Amino acid sequence: MVNVFQRLTRRATSSTQKPRVARSTSHGRLRRSLSVSSNKRTRRAPAEEPAPKHLLLISDTPEFDHRIIHRYQAEGFDVEYLSFSCTGDPERDRKHLDFVVHEREDELEAGERYAIVAYNRPAYYLLASHHLATSNTNPFPRLCALIAYYPLTSTSDLPPGNCTEECIPACCDTSAIFEPGPETTYLPIQIHIPGNKADKSTIWPWITISSSEGDVTYKKRHRCYLYNYPDAGFRFAEPEFACVRKDSQGFRGEGEGRNEVCESLAWSRVLGCLRRAFGVGSNWAVVDIETVWEEYWGALLEEVEIRKNGHDNGSVNKGSILGLVSGGEYALDGGEHGHEPSVECAPTKAGGAGIDSLRSFFSHVFIPAGPANQQVRLLSRTVGADRIVDEISFSFVHTAEVPWLLPGVSPTLREIKVVIVVVASFCADKIVNQSLYWDQADVLVQAGILDPALVPKMSGVQ
């Protein structure tokens, strides 16, 4: 806990004319019930209440997009939004923002930590405070992660418009940052900037200070990551305020300036950083996405086994499947209440969007609809913060129509085997979207309805 004398000093030295700070706390934090999955993997209830994951959202707008707040809540964070109105005096604003953050830090219980996601000028001020050249200690000792969205002095600082990632030194001696010892902990700092590679010396002048001029920031145990989003406009992470990126030819694109790809990519990076900062393996209130994903596949494969044993009831267990699918009301890339859950089989356009459509899809079209001898085998899996990519082998004897793979094709009695890539997106512990991709020409050749001579072959491939 911060020393009492430090508190009194901060309060005594704070300016009487302070920038306005509005505080908005989150209420009704989401609690999700835990149950036993259909494939016998157990979601164990935590032995004790998970430690709070305090998250401060700070921006310079009176209100903040409720969808972003709700999604952070859904991911298990205790969220508080601080509206920080700047006065035009950068140094006074920076000091007062430090004071406000320290006040929140003082309210934490012993052992608790917090993270900050800041936008616009407040993000700039927090970075500036952390990189003060005359200080060799972190200004916020209980901060476990700092996310800074477009910390620019103005939109004129935007670099001209290949999304790149770069570790920026933030000091001259980088050995302590990029080569930490085995027991060294460091503060992760993410900086998200629209446009191409930024000129750091122009946007953040403190980075160019040399050690001979008294720069001791290298002694601060931290690591900065700079992410650029060439196709994104200013404030791209806030759908309500996103604008089209401006380049040398003027504003690019028409209509709203949202870029859902950049928006989603930034969200994944931030979520992954925050989870690591608070401890991925710690007691978390939200079930991890891989457990949800395996429960989903367990429900599908359980129906396949039922059909193999001759107990076909003509309908997949819709309750188990649809219970793992979300309407995406917290998704950042949706409308007023997010987007509908969806499944798309890209080669055949089979799938559906919305609960009613998916209920029919899982009952009559997708696995286990089709032959009773279907085999599904996992080949590889990549797990991200909010996305899973599976490569699976799907094989069967074509004794019945497979409406999602070979729609309208009568049984050919041929053996068919295909590799399918499944990309699944999640919001908290719900599946929001699935996209399936495979080589449809290869499937048609195996089914005997496409001449193999019409399918190009790579050199050396038989």
Image (cartoon, rainbow, N blue to C red):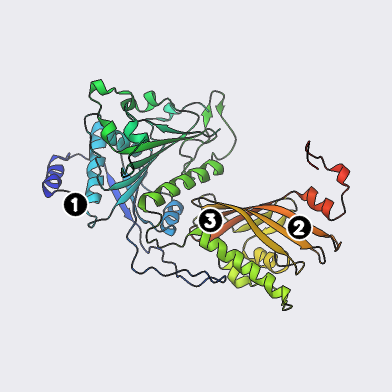
Spot occupied by residue 297 in the image (x, y as percentages of width and height): 61, 64
- Vertical position of residue 321 compared to residue 349: above or below: below
Spot occupied by residue 132 in the image (x, y as percentages of width and height): 25, 31
User: Left or right: where does residue 217 sit relative to residue 229?
Assistant: left
Distance from disc 2 to disc 1, alpha carbons, whole Å, reads 60 Å
Tell me the tag on residue 426.
3
Name the residue nearer the viewer: 108 or 122: 108
Tell me the tag on residue 405.
2
Q: Label 1 amino acid?
A: Met
Distance from disc 3 to disc 1, alpha carbons, whole Å, reads 37 Å
Spot occupied by residue 154 in the image (x, y as percentages of width and height): 39, 30
For the point 44% across and 59% down, the residue is 74
For the point 49% across and 56% down, the residue is 330
How packed mark 2 is, by other alpha carbons closer than 10 Å (few <14, some 14-19, many 20 or more), is many
Q: Secondary structure at mark 1?
A: loop
For the point 31% across and 42% down, the residue is 184
Q: Quadrant of the C terminus?
A: top right
Q: Kindly indicate the quadrant of the structure image that contains residue 405.
A: bottom right
User: Left or right: where does residue 158 sit relative to residue 172?
Assistant: right
Distance from disc 3 to disc 2, alpha carbons, whole Å, reads 24 Å
Mark with earlier residue (3, 1): 1
User: Left or right: where does residue 375 sit relative to residue 7?
Assistant: right
How packed mark 3 is, by other alpha carbons closer than 10 Å (few <14, some 14-19, many 20 or more), is many
Name the residue nearer the viewer: 295 or 61: 295
User: Circle 1 sits on which residue?
Assistant: 1
Mark with earlier residue (2, 1): 1
Mark with earlier residue (3, 2): 2
Spot occupied by residue 359 in the image (x, y as percentages of width and height): 66, 67
Q: Label 3 amino acid?
A: Phe
Q: Secondary structure at mark 3?
A: strand
